[in-house]
Amino acid sequence: MTSIPPLVDSHIHLYEFDDIELESLCKDDYVMLAVSDDILSSFKTVEIARKCEKVIPAIGVHPWTIKGEVKIDPLIDLINKNPVRFLGEVGLDKRFVPETFEFQLRVFKEFIELAETYKLGISLHAPDAWRDALEVLKKSSVRVVIFHWYTGPLDLIKEVIDEGFYIGINVAAKFQKKHAEVIKVVPIERLVTESDGPYRYRGVTLKPSLLPELVSFIASTKGLSEHDVRIAIWSNFSKILKDAGLLL
Ligand SMILES: [Zn+2]
């Protein structure tokens, strides 16, 4: 009998959890790609990853925190001194903060250059800017990208997949109909799970403990067994890590 692989949380803001929660998450059966929101949280995330081997750190500046020019030099220093292989949460956002789009685009392009130089993977945020982000990525040499909590047009998914990128399905799919539709369209080979914890959505605090329910939701949507879904998602995530230069 094959053993069950760990649950995958491909997008979580771990630095926002308290020490007790962190300790318990680290003991549980999760492998987590921990994203950051700004320079300070990037440093915190790298520190958390140093203490918990199930945490893969991603550093960056979230589009929501961009108000003007951003100096990303401290992050370059962080990459040079630590085993950082991912940028996140970075991207573009025309839904929640359209007023800063011009700055966001400038910063995003800087991050793309950084990812090209260091061959980093990206956890991408792009509400209502999915095509804008895809176009920037297509022109780059960046090959490892997870489109986090994808809620974009269903007909754009094929283009995302054709580029070799992955789609992040959030635990909120169970109660966000638009997101649930995405599960039907994305082939199981290109899908990864995520919590985006501890973000609050429609009164629910999103967290990794909701991942088993998501796995069973994906299984029933796709007509697969939960076991097969867990194996597929772990295999996808392992490939993402390997392609970003991480050895498991
Ligand atoms: Zn997030």
Image (tube, rainbow, N blue to C red):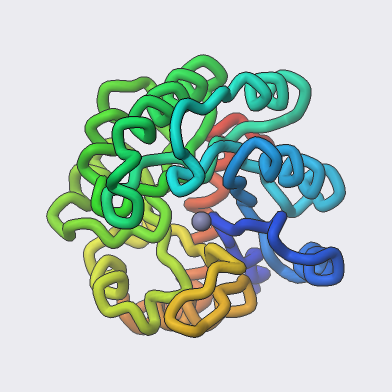
Q: Toward which corner of the image does residue 220 lie, by quadrant?
A: bottom left
Q: Relative to 68, is 161 above or below?
A: below
Looking at the figure, which quarter contains the N terminus? Answer: bottom right
Choose top left, top right, bottom left or bottom right for residue 58: top right
Q: Give the camera-side residue of 7 and 79.
A: 79
Residue 151 x/y as whole percent: 28, 61
Rendering coords of residue 85 (x, y %): 62, 32
Evaluate whether residue 223 shows in this view: no
The residue positioned 48% from the left and 38% from the top of the image is: 122
Rendered location of residue 121, percent (x, y): 51, 35
Q: Is residue 156 left or right of residue 118?
A: left
| Residue 126: % across, % down | 34, 48
Instruction: Report the number of numbered marks.
Output: 0
Q: Residue at x 76, y 45 (%)?
A: 44
In which quadrant is the C terminus drawn?
top right
Q: Is residue 7 above or below residue 141?
A: below
Tell whether 210 sits left or right of 18: left
Asked whether, in this view, residue 45 is left or right of residue 107, the answer is right
Q: Is residue 19 above or below residue 52?
A: below
Q: Residue at x 61, y 46 (%)?
A: 36
